[in-house]
Image (cartoon, rainbow, N blue to C red):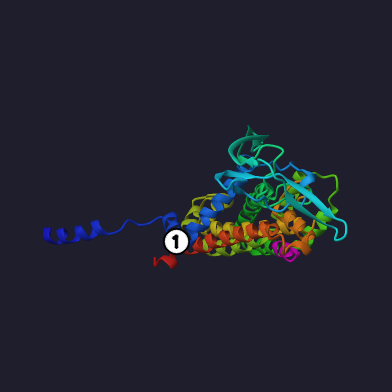
Amino acid sequence: MESAIATIKPVIADEPLRKTPWDRLWADKLARFSLLVLALLYFGAIFADPLTPYSMGFNDAEVANQPPSVIHWHNAQGNVEGPYVLQVERTFNPETFQQSYMELPGPGFPIKLFIKGEPYKILGIIPGDIHLFGVQDPGRLFLLGSDINGRDNFSRLFFGAQKSLTIGFLGLFIAFPIGIVYGGISGFLGGAIDNAMMRLAEAIMSVPSFYLLIGLAAMLPPEMTSSQRFALITVILSFIGWAGLARVIRGMVLSIREEEFVQAARAAGMPEFFNVIKHVLPQTASFIIVAATLQVPNFILSESGLSFIGLGIQQPDASWGNMLKAALDNANELVDQPWLLAPGFLIFITILCFNNVGDVLRDVLDPKMQGR
């Protein structure tokens, strides 16, 4: 007997520890890369003020539509020195109606780290005036050029991320609780109540959401601020996005409600509502997590689409959608100004990363995919 136990112990000792879902998610290279990219994007959105050389309200009409600044590393004598930019002058050709920029000779403006600039408040709370990099006035540093109003496109990408990336999670906080509770109650009660609740959900799902948003956004009074529009768009997207989730949760609850632990709670006298909240809905947690990662891109695309057609976030506030609209206004010059498409590239990367994480989460949280 002792010899048998002795032979079993080394096998047990060498058996690898069971990995948590987070460990299996992080072990996937594509998911890990996507999580890191999303972390960088949200970090940049939160700390947009200190990370960028200019505030969202900055503009200089004298340098409208300026191409990206040329960063110099050698002085006039050819010696290497710290990076700097030269002052530029705008010229206009009356025959071709085109403007161009020419660098002026001079000492230049050194690019400095942790430079004092425009004051700001991080998240509207923490004051500061130190920017990660920049140049002293009257020099201008435009890494991605300037727009038609002389605003820095690079800085506005960060401020636009605050709107475009935030709307996804704000929408989840409204839509998901409604869909989860509604679908849970419908599936648990069943019968005529279930039929009536599902017909209402199907009626909402049958409404073409994007056209509804266009109609509602067009009805908004023009004096509304961008913050009010942002809040209203978030609420509208949320209240038309819960029905699909409710149907799926209802289907899952129909099978879970027959489990023994749910029947035992009912036999013990637990009220039906608390039985759903405590015993049924937690069993749908894995699906809800995956659905959340896949639903965020839908909110981002909806907001960007509305802003792109001029019915979402309005100028001078920035969002990736209205920055793309500004690029469309200069469609004839996109070949010469490809940096104007940077917001579209960031939308593509963000949605791709969320979808990658959602796909891996689906496999990680599915017991059948783990051989259990």
Q: Which residue lies furthest to the top in this view?
A: 127
Residue drawn at the location 57% of the way across and 59% of the way down: 354
Residue drawn at the location 56% of the way across and 59% of the way down: 353
Q: Up-down: is 345 above or below 69?
A: below
Residue 111 placed where, x, y %?
61, 42
Comparing 233 with 31, the one in front is: 31
Disc 1 marks a residue whose amino acid type is Asp
Binning the other alpha carbons within 10 Å of mark 1 as few (below 14), some (14 to 19) or many (20 upward) gives some
The quarter of the displayed image where residue 281 is located: bottom right
Residue drawn at the location 68% of the way across and 57% of the way down: 339
Q: Give the range drawn in magenta.
A: 201-209
Residue 225 placed where, x, y %?
79, 44
Comparing 153 with 210, the one in front is: 153
Helix, strand or loop at label 1? It is loop
Residue 316 placed where, x, y %?
77, 46
The quarter of the displayed image where residue 295 is located: bottom right
Residue 53 appears in the picture as rendered:
yes
Q: Which residue lies furthest to the right in this view?
A: 94
Residue 207 shown in magenta = yes
Q: In which quarter of the image is the N terminus?
A: bottom left
Residue 70 placed where, x, y %?
65, 51
Comparing 350 with 192, the one in front is: 350
Which residue is under mark 1?
28
Residue 240 appears in the picture as rendered:
no
Q: In which quarter of the image is the C terminus?
A: bottom left
Magenta segment, prevailing SS (helix, strand or loop): helix
Comparing 61 with 128, the one in front is: 61
Seen in the image, is 333 located left or right of residue 243?
A: right
